[in-house]
Amino acid sequence: MPVIIICSDLDESETGTSITNSCERLATLIWNKYKEEELAKNPGFLFIEHYPRHNQAWGDVVETFCLVQFNFDGEKFSS
């Protein structure tokens, strides 16, 4: 079973860079730190970005979870 990684945006307004704009960098950092430990034991990982209630553009949506797909060039992830 793949490792599931959930990265959440801060549950506040105006917190700086969003998870969407940081996910490639975060995935690369996580891969580099854990590729020989936890990630080596599993067939890859699933990266999910989470937006809590304060960062929603839709009025009645409480929060969202989205699966992010990446390309990997051997060194870093990109969308």
Image (cartoon, helix red, strand yellow):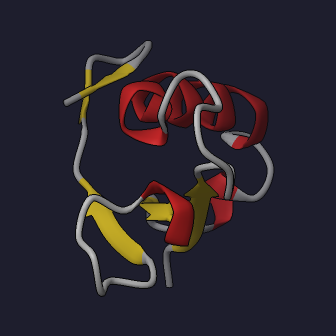
Relative vertical location of residue 36 with respect to residue 62 in this rendering, above or below: above
Q: Residue at x 41, y 17 (%)?
A: 76
Q: Residue at x 30, y 65 (%)?
A: 67
Residue 52 appearing in the image: no
Residue 62 appearing in the image: yes
Q: Residue at x 66, y 40 (%)?
A: 35
Q: Specify whether 49 is left or right of 10.
A: left
Q: Residue at x 53, y 23 (%)?
A: 17
Residue 70 lies in quadrant: top left
Residue 79 lies in quadrant: top left
In this view, which residue lies farthest toward the front? Answer: 59
Q: Specify whether 75 is left or right of 78.
A: right
Along the line of sight, the residue nearer the viewer: 53 or 35: 53
Q: Specify whether 28 is left or right of 15.
A: left
Relative vertical location of residue 22 with respect to residue 65 in this rendering, above or below: above
Along the line of sight, the residue nearer the viewer: 14 or 20: 14
Q: Position of residue 16 (x, y in %)?
A: 59, 22
Residue 48 lies in quadrant: bottom left
Q: Position of residue 38 (x, y in %)?
A: 75, 58
Along the line of sight, the residue nearer the viewer: 5 or 31: 5
Relative vertical location of residue 66 with respect to residue 59 in this rendering, above or below: above
Along the line of sight, the residue nearer the viewer: 24 or 20: 20
Q: Position of residue 49 (x, y in %)?
A: 44, 58
Relative vertical location of residue 12 with respect to residue 14 in this rendering, above or below: below
